[in-house]
């Protein structure tokens, strides 16, 4: 008599992976329907259905799925947001990330919908709209503004404030600062430092709005340019860069030497970036996040130590590196001293 196969491994992980896209889909559907906007206080499914003009029965099914997925809470047939959902998925909150997730989802879908085709045939020819287009950069800056102030900016500002040299800093540069909220947060930690947000002209139009919002016009300035080809200024005690040197991957020595020359003697350069390890298979979040971009012909991922080695080649006298736990997964922090 034939017996069933004997197993010493479980298929549980594959079932979890198989159902995980459903969890992502219900989050994105909740954002599309603006359901989370109506769940700041406990309400019934009937109230939600009336507010969003939806089918009452399917609304119950969907709300129960949101509860099962960890997005909302349910008790006595009433539903309300978890603290995380309230902070990050409710519109008009300063840390709302819904638009950021929607944009990321659309970008990833371009690659994911025909992943097999891209693997077989290779990257598609360049599209009409370059990743370097000013309009694209400005849109990216606007979308990532709340990402910067939804925990990342606060974490980075505290790290900088803990540098032993921090009290002596007088002038700092946020290189490729985007919306500028990390640079603003760092400047706010220091009573006297002058901060400069450096980025492309259209991006700085976004940064101007946040400088005004946080009433930092007297403390934070802007400088327009392309750090590959233009001057970045000089006389800095501190230079910060966050997830921007990916775009200097093939020009890293030139850009690092420019950063070195812009610092005063004894100045500090701190760079925050991804770093791929284990033969470029970890961290999981970074490998998976870069996959859609890479198969579309833009591999911006770094090997761990790539930036630190370039810092030493540029002439920095010391470099210290460590891996940080962040909301988006493990990231590398490299600190170089001139």
Image: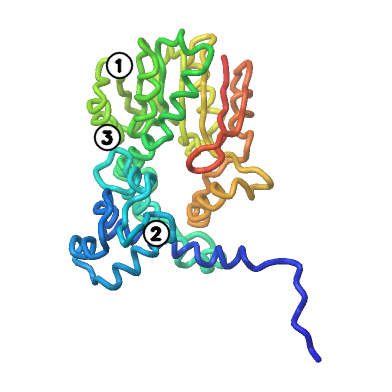
Instruction: Return the residue nearer the eye: 58 or 326.
Output: 58
Instruction: Name the residue at 41% across, 17% down.
Output: 172
Task: Using the image, tell me which numbered label, if any, was put on residue 67.
Answer: 2
* Lower sequence index among marks 2 and 3: 2
| Label 1 secondary element | loop
Residue 176: x and y, percent? 40, 31
| Residue ranking furthest to the bottom | 1
Q: Which residue is mark 1?
A: 219
Give the distance between the C-alpha atoms of the residues marked 1 and 3, in whole angstroms.
17 Å
Q: Is residue 175 visible?
A: yes
Nearest-to-viewer mark from 1 and 3? 1
Helix, strand, or loop for circle 3? helix
**How far apart are the two marked residues, 2 and 3, measured between alpha carbons?**
36 Å
Q: In this picture, is 334 found above or below 302?
A: above
Q: From the viewer's perspective, is residue 177 above or below residue 287?
A: above
Label 1: how many Cα within 10 Å (few below 14, some 14–19, many 20+): some
Badge 2 crowding class, 10 Å Cα cut-off, few under 14, some 14 to 19, many 20 or more, is some
Between the residue at mark 1 and the residue at mark 2, the CA separation in whole angstroms equals: 45 Å
| Residue in view at x 58 percent, y 40 percent | 302
The answer to whether mark 1 and mark 3 are in CB contact below 8 A is: no
Sequence-earlier tag: 1 or 2: 2
Residue at x 55%, y 63% (from the top left corner): 17
| Residue 205 in the image, given as x and y percentages of width and height | 25, 33
Q: Quadrant of residue 197?
A: top left
Residue denoted by label 3: 206
From the top left corner, tell me how far across and down residue 246 is, in percent: 50, 38
């Amino acid at each position: 008599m034939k017996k069933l196969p004997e197993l010493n491994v479980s298929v549980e992980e594959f079932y979890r992976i198989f159902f995980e896209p459903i969890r992502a889909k219900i989050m994105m559907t909740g954002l599309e329907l603006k359901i989370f906007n109506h769940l700041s206080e406990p309400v019934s499914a009937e109230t939600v259905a009336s507010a969003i003009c939806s089918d009452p029965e399917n609304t119950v099914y969907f709300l129960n799925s949101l509860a099962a997925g960890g997005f909302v809470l349910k008790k006595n047939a009433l539903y309300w947001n978890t603290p995380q959902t309230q902070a990050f998925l409710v519109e008009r909150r300063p840390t709302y990330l819904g638009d950021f997730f929607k944009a990321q989802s659309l970008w990833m879908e371009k690659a994911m919908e025909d992943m097999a085709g891209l693997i077989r045939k290779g990257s598609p020819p360049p599209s009409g709209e370059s990743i370097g287009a000013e309009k694209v950069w400005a849109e990216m800056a606007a979308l990532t503004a709340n990402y910067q102030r939804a925990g990342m900016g606060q974490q980075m500002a505290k790290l900088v404030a803990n540098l032993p040299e921090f009290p002596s800093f007088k002038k700092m540069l946020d290189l490729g600062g985007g919306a500028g909220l990390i640079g603003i947060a760092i400047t706010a930690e220091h009573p006297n430092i002058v901060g400069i947000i450096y980025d492309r002209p259209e991006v700085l139009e976004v940064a101007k709005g946040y400088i005004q919002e946080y009433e930092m016009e007297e403390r934070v300035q802007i400088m327009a340019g392309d750090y590959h080809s233009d001057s970045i200024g000089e006389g800095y005690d501190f230079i910060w860069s966050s997830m921007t040197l990916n775009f200097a991957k093939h020009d890293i020595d030139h850009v690092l030497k420019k950063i070195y020359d812009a610092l005063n003697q004894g100045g500090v350069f701190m760079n925050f970036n991804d770093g791929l390890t284990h033969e470029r298979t970890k961290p999981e979040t970074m490998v998976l996040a870069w996959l859609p971009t890479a198969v579309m012909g833009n591999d911006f991922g770094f090997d761990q130590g790539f930036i630190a080695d370039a810092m030493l080649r540029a002439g920095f006298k010391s470099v210290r590196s460590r891996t940080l736990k962040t909301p988006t997964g493990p990231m590398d922090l490299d600190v170089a001293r001139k």
